[in-house]
Image: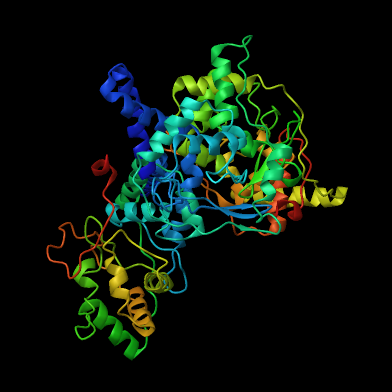
């Protein structure tokens, strides 16, 4: 993809520009290139570049409980982009969630995280965006449900739920940890997906806040070691997992695969290690999913297990093994936390849609899984129930209703 | 008796060897691409009523272009858009090359269309229609319709419904190629009956002995066609 080549080039330029950082001639370029890397850390393109669209020209449709947001054009075009924004305007947007006319921005853009980012980093991102080719492209207005279309209400939202400001470094922690926290809570905006929002999109701060649904997938909470938490991983393994999208018995799929492909694989080793260092120290919590599983009767559960077993042998065992032990390229399902966590939607999506983990430097030729969209809702539920309840896995069975997206 | 026994042993050995070789051969890329062959396996392709196209043996440049088109939404298919979403240009090219190198048996041709439809189909494929400014398919896709290196696909061994759907998709603008999109220009000159005629005639063609794409590029094509350069040329 063009974007990944551009990013590889940017990474190389950054590496090279480090050699010349002291030379004033390169100062402007160095800022732009640093901004490019920071924009990669923040994955601006993940939302502001539509598939097949011009870089940063917007147009991606983001479904939400409040309606559909259409991402704006942030190329330097003066009329349809943000070409007439000053550094102060850009800072106001990223730090305070305010547009140049003073109106509030929707928190669909995670300025609730970007507010923790330092001014000179924000300025560098702006320098990078100003240096991009201007694309003249008007994006349509957001298509939001009543009353969320009234932007004036956002002022109230910000007053009630949003506090601007940098995170004070914790001197008792290492520089690496503080860098990791700056990345995870700031540009990386991990909790924009991995932590649910409360009523009216309020940011939740409780340590046992559940994850959130994004594009029909559940982004599990980072606090729970049985879900997305990395507390029990070595820092090196966790960093490699973030960068490559693959670990010995795991491969990332779904929206997180996009994040790895577009952003995380381009993080420097130091930044990936810093993020892993911080993520490992998040206080472990047992987090309940907001999804309420429908309970099956004993007979219903037994029927589901029997049907699931037949389906597993027919469709899955060849790659994932008779006992869910996995094989080259096919992760083990026994002891797999994506399989056993409360919310079964991710494992159901993987079966329905198949797909490839991201192709990265650490995993350049990923193994793909075939889609099984021919399974009926009942068959899918039976299969999911079977792998959730076999080979030492002890998660309750599910019904088709729980797998609807 | 000993001769027969020897023959049996030899045959059994040959079979065993073939099986081992097939597994070894698959191990390199085939296992990684089980997601592709689950649908695009040659055994699963059916020309009469099927839809899924053959990808084995098509030119690598063509296959690579299609994978990139799916990634950039110039082609739309929920499954395919999802499959290629975060694969690198280098890997997509390796996938294309892998399937380009595969030789797989062809399914039986579909039944021949009725007289007038067959005549129109044969005309458009073999000679084109000068009055309507429609070039012959064979002018670009090879005299035996087995495709031309590096970017032009073969048209034989494809399901009738697939060909109809592709020509229709170009016509209504849901399938695109890199500019200049020659097939979009050509399909604008076809009507529904032309599309049915071409697809039905193509799906009914017997498979030629040599199914390899023509090695030499066509020097003077009737229209200029765009393509995405291979990743080596893009870096």
Relative height, residue A382 to residue B146 (above, below): above
Q: Kindly give the residue lying farthest to the front in the view shown.
A: A101
Residue B132 vs residue B15, the one in the foreground: B132
Residue A122 vs residue B84, the one in the foreground: A122
Residue A222 image position (x, y, % from top left): 66, 30
Q: Residue drawn at (46%, 50%), measured in percent from left and top?
A: A73
Q: Residue drawn at (37%, 88%), measured in percent from left and top?
A: B114
- Where, quadrant-wise, is the N terminus of chain A in this rendering? top left
Residue A310 image position (x, y, % from top left): 68, 50
Residue B137 vs residue A181, the one in the foreground: A181
Q: Residue drawn at (72%, 57%), measured in percent from left and top?
A: A378
The reply, left or right, for residue A322 in relation to residue B230 is right
Tag count = 0
Figure colour scheme = rainbow
> In this view of the protein, can residue A266 be seen by the observer?
no
Relative height, residue B30 to residue B149 (above, below): above
Residue B13 image position (x, y, % from top left): 38, 42
> In this view of the protein, can residue B200 be seen by the observer?
yes
Residue B214 image position (x, y, % from top left): 19, 60
């Amino acid at each position: 993809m063009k974007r990944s080549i551009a990013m590889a080039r940017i990474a190389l330029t950054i590496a090279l520009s480090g050699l010349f950082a002291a030379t004033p001639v390169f100062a402007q370029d160095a800022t732009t290139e640093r901004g490019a890397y920071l924009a990669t850390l923040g994955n601006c393109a993940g939302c502001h570049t539509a598939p097949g669209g011009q870089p940063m020209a917007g147009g991606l449709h983001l479904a939400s409980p409040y309606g559909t947001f259409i991402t704006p054009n942030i190329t330097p075009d003066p009329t349809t982009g943000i070409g007439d924004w000053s550094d102060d305007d850009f800072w106001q947007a990223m730090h305070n969630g305010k547009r140049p006319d003073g109106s509030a921005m929707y928190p669909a853009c995670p300025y609730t995280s970007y507010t923790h980012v330092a001014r000179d980093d924000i300025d560098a991102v702006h320098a990078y965006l100003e240096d991009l080719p201007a694309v003249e492209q008007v994006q349509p207005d957001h298509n939001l449900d009543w009353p969320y279309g009234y932007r004036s209400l956002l002022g109230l939202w910000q007053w009630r739920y949003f506090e601007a400001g940098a995170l004070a470094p914790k001197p008792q922690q290492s520089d690496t940890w503080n860098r990791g926290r700056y990345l995870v809570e700031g540009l990386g905006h991990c909790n924009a997906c991995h932590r649910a929002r409360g009523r009216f999109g309020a940011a939740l701060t409780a340590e046992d806040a559940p994850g959130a649904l994004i594009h029909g997938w559940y982004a599990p909470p980072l606090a729970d070691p049985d879900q997305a938490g990395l507390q029990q991983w070595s820092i090196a393994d966790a960093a490699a997992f973030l960068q490559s999208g693959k670990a010995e018995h795991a491969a990332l799929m779904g929206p997180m695969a996009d994040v790895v492909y577009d952003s995380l694989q381009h993080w420097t080793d130091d930044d990936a290690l810093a993020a892993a260092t911080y993520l490992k120290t998040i206080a472990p919590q047992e987090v309940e999913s907001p999804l309420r599983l429908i309970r099956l009767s004993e007979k219903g559960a037994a029927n589901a297990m029997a049907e699931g077993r037949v389906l597993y042998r027919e469709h899955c065992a060849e790659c994932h093994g008779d006992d869910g032990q996995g094989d080259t390229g096919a992760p083990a399902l026994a002891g797999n936390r994506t399989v056993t966590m409360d919310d079964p939607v991710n494992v159901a999506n993987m079966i329905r849609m198949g797909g490839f983990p991201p192709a990265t430097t650490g995993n350049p030729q990923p193994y793909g899984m075939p889609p099984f969209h021919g399974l009926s809702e009942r068959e899918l539920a039976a299969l999911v129930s079977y792998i959730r309840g076999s080979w030492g896995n002890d998660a309750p069975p599910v019904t088709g209703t729980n797998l609807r997206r | 008796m000993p001769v027969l026994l020897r023959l049996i042993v030899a045959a059994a050995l040959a079979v065993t060897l073939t099986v081992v070789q097939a597994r070894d051969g698959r191990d390199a890329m085939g296992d990684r691409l089980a997601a592709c062959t689950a649908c695009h396996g040659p055994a699963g392709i059916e020309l009469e009523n099927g839809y899924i196209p053959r990808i084995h043996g098509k030119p690598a440049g063509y296959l690579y272009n299609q994978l990139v088109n799916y990634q950039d939404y110039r082609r739309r298919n929920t499954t395919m858009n999802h499959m290629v979403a975060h694969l690198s240009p280098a890997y997509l090219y390796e996938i294309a090359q892998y399937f380009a190198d595969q030789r797989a048996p062809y399914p039986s041709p579909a039944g021949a269309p009725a007289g007038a439809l067959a005549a129109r189909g044969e005309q458009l494929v073999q000679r084109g229609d000068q009055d309507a400014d429609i070039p012959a398919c064979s002018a670009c896709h090879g005299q035996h319709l087995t495709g031309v290196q590096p970017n032009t696909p073969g048209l034989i061994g494809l399901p009738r419904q697939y060909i109809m759907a592709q020509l229709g998709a170009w016509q209504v603008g849901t399938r695109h190629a890199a500019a200049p999109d020659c097939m979009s220009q050509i399909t604008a000159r076809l009507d529904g009956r032309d599309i049915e005629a071409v697809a039905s005639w193509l799906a009914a063609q017997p498979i030629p002995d040599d199914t390899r794409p023509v090695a030499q590029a066509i020097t003077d094509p009737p229209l200029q066609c765009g393509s995405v350069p291979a990743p080596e040329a893009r870096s």
